[in-house]
Image (spheres, grey):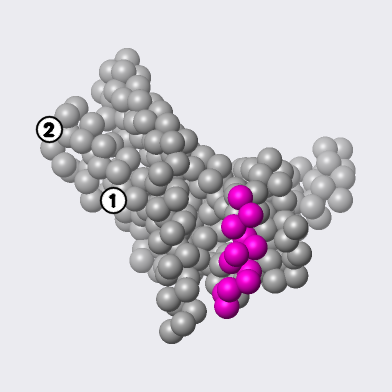
Amino acid sequence: MRSINVIKAIALNTFRETVRDRVLYAIVIFALLATLAGVIFGQLSADQDLRILEDLGLSVITLFGGVIAVFIGTTLVFKEIDRRTIFLIVTKPIARWEFVTGKFFGLALCVLVTNFAMGLFFLGVIWFQTANFNSALPLFYALSLVYVELVLVIAMATFFSTFCTPLMSMIFTTGLWTVGHLSFSFDMLKELARDPKHLSKSTEILAIVLQNTMPDLAKLTVIRSNFMDNVFVPNSAILYLILYIAAYVVFLLTLSSMIAERREFS
């Protein structure tokens, strides 16, 4: 119970600090403007304006939600060190894992709020264009999976922030996030590597290792598209993906806590 209260206090404090960050509002405003740009692009196409708007809107929310998660998440621990507040925290009866977990949940709450706000704005734009809410339920499901993906990105950023500078954390987090969307490319590499004329055997081994260790985010994208196309998605597939992402999040937070426990702050 004590740990839960500590984590809750750190999470709420992190949330309050994050929502006061001017950079956050700049990113959200830019995302909203980019969503409005989808209206223009949609009207340039024949009979595909709604579909283009939906695809662009979801892409914008995912991209800028990820930017928020990466930009703010990679500075979570660094800010505490830079402002010397970390020394006050470590002298209190607060475990390092409680500190890391609280920071993670605080940013996750902030991303949830911004994701919800951008989703409402996106739905309003769709209603303005079509005067109906037929896309509301599929959009809700798709945005839920977007948030699941962003929670993983937050966990990545939190992990790298415990031992890297903000710049290196951003590079590593963005790189890992990008690789997670290239799972289909790994299959292609394995096929090419089977023919010595194209690629070496070591390339096939590398593709297998990456495919089995990196988070497979491409499946989330496919299921989001299926929701928007009203294609039936089994509940078992959704549950599997959520548990799959949750396992990665727990693993990354565990590593983050272990590194934080061993790190000497100076």
Write down the quadrant of residue 216 in the picture.
bottom right
Q: Earlier in the sequence, mark 2 or mark 1?
A: 2
Write down the quadrant of residue 132 in the picture.
top left
What amino acid is at disc 2? Answer: Ala
| Label 2 Cα crowd, 10 Å radius (few <14 / some 14-19 / many 20+) | few
- Per the image, the residue denoted by label 1 is 140
Q: Quadrant of the C terminus?
A: bottom right
Secondary structure of the residue carrying tag 1 is helix
Q: Is residue 92 left or right of residue 206?
A: left
Q: Position of residue 144 (x, y in %)?
A: 36, 54
Question: Residue, x 45% and y 41% (percent of image)?
Answer: 21
Name the foreground residue: 93 vs 21: 93
Q: Is residue 232 left or right of residue 108?
A: left
- Per the image, the residue denoted by label 2 is 131
| Label 1 Cα crowd, 10 Å radius (few <14 / some 14-19 / many 20+) | some
Q: How many marks?
A: 2
* Residue 56 seen from this side: no
What amino acid is at disc 1? Answer: Phe
Q: Quadrant of the N terminus?
A: bottom left
**Residue 266 magenta:** no
Name the foreground residue: 87 vs 169: 87
Q: Is residue 104 left or right of residue 185?
A: left
Q: Check the image and report above or below for 210 versus 174.
A: below
Q: Which residue in the rendered view is the most extreme toward the left?
A: 131
* Residue 249 seen from this side: yes
Secondary structure of the residue carrying tag 2 is loop
Q: Which residues fall within the magenta stretch?
A: 83-94
Q: Position of residue 128 (x, y in %)?
A: 17, 29
